[in-house]
Image (cartoon, helix red, strand yellow):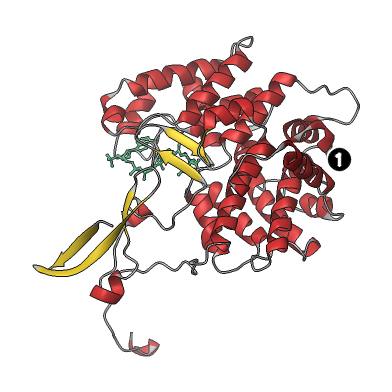
Amino acid sequence: MDEATIRVGGEDRIDLPIIEGTEGEQALDIGNLRRDTGLVTLDRGYGNTAETVSAVTFIDGEEGILRYRGYPVDQLVRESSFLEAALLLDRGELPSRAELDRYEEEIGRHAALPDGIASVLESFPAGAHPMQKLAAAVILLRPYLPEAGDPTDTESARLGAVHLMAKTAALAAWSYRSGADRIYTEPRPDLGYAANFLNMMFNPGDGAYELNPAHIRAMEALLVLHADHGQNLSTSAVRLVGSSQADLFSAVSAGILGLSGPLHGGANQRVIEMLEAILADGGDTRRYLDRAKDRNDPFRLMGFGHRVYRNFDPRSDLIKHHARSLLHEQDDPLLDLALQLEQEALADDFFIRRRIYPNVDYYSGILYRALGFPSEQFTVLFAIGRLPGWLAQWREMISDPQVRIKRPRQIYTGYPRRDYIPIDKR
Ligand code: SDX
């Protein structure tokens, strides 16, 4: 095994082992650094730090590669269903026909929501964001399912994952309907995952609603594309909270709330808001590009840039393809504007030098809009897609014999010791 030597103050302090992953990625294993040298490392935003090893998803940000358990994501989008991809992520192998049938049957059997959920969803104030409602509703499942989601019991952990895969789409659909027309369409697992979700979201219950096969295909593709992405913020939140042995529902709720931020999963909603603002402002893309480049302007080009991808995000191209094929009959000014803005940004030296490309959120909002979703639901759709990734990463963590509670160090920069001053003497 290769090693690296840490020299401090001119003296050799320690030889650190270098570990190598299956794709040639290398890391300094600093597990004994503080014990042997008294030093810790400082890495704001973890841009240089791997917190774990993982066999779930491989990302090569330089080459724009994304694979789930070794399978390229574009093949899975083309060939796989969302539930098949979920099983692959969780168990590490493509399921046999019998395994997939058993899983689909179990998901269908647990699809119904517990009584009382609807009244809780209706109790939210009108302005509650769907991501906050979803996070709260997921936590609410726990008291109804006390036998599920215990990380210290294999079957309970498995059952918790099944219930979340079975119920989260309905929780999302019902939380949307509780704010709109209060007609809850019961889950129809027989339709298939994506079709059932679209039916629960949009079927008004008067029998007039027809599922559009092109919409089902696009929804399935979006779900598979979002299914996992390594140690992104929301997955890291699930692992962090899960490392305290909190129940699975609590860990996933933390992931949902982490995903809601505009710099992470919340970007898809902000992309549409940005494009609508540019359109309303006369379509002056150059002015918005200049704002994004101005260090004194907090405006960022939403849907652009990525911590890992320093090349194109393979998911963005796949979503753009689906958006174009779904919208080829409709003349969507937002899609035209998005294509123009992308072209101008990719030709602009500021973005080229910083290797800033469209990410998964850039075109997903346009496709979600074409499927009929309101923009405040977009990040909920991201959460439903990312759920199998959270579950697979959580299970990988709780099954790891080397797992420890996650507790980063810090470098203190506050006051040195000082004595209390009574208030009348301040
Ligand atoms: C997701 O991690 C994952 O895998 C996430 C995700 C997943 O599947 O889970 O892929 C999903 O979160 C996608 C990202 C969605 N967020 C957005 O689209 C928001 C807009 N993007 C930026 O805020 C930013 O690019 C981030 C947050 C995505 C990445 O931030 P980093 O890695 O901390 O990069 P940075 O802020 O240090 O930027 C480096 C430089 C800076 O300029 P300088 O200080 O060098 O002059 O690039 C600039 C930044 O100002 N920059 C941008 C920009 N993104 C980076 N400038 C304008 N617009 C942008 N979008």
Query: Which residue is drawn at the image coordinates 64% and 65% (left, top)?
Result: 151
Mark 1 lies on a secondary structure that is: loop
Q: Nearer the viewer, residue 369 or 309?
A: 309
Q: Quadrant of residue 44?
A: bottom left
**Left/right of residue 203 with respect to residue 126 in the rendered view:** right
Q: Quadrant of ligand 1?
A: top left
**Left/right of residue 20 with respect to residue 155 in the rendered view:** left
The percent position of residue 124, horizontal first and vertical second, equals 73, 52
The percent position of residue 355, horizontal first and vertical second, equals 31, 32
**Left/right of residue 340 with respect to residue 104 in the rendered view:** left
Considering the image in quadrants, where does the N terminus appear? bottom left
The percent position of residue 81, horizontal first and vertical second, equals 67, 32
Query: Which residue is drawn at the image coordinates 62% and 48% (left, top)?
Result: 91
Considering the image in quadrants, where does the C terminus appear? bottom left
Name the kind of residue labelled 1 in the image: Glu
Q: Which residue is mark 1?
A: 186
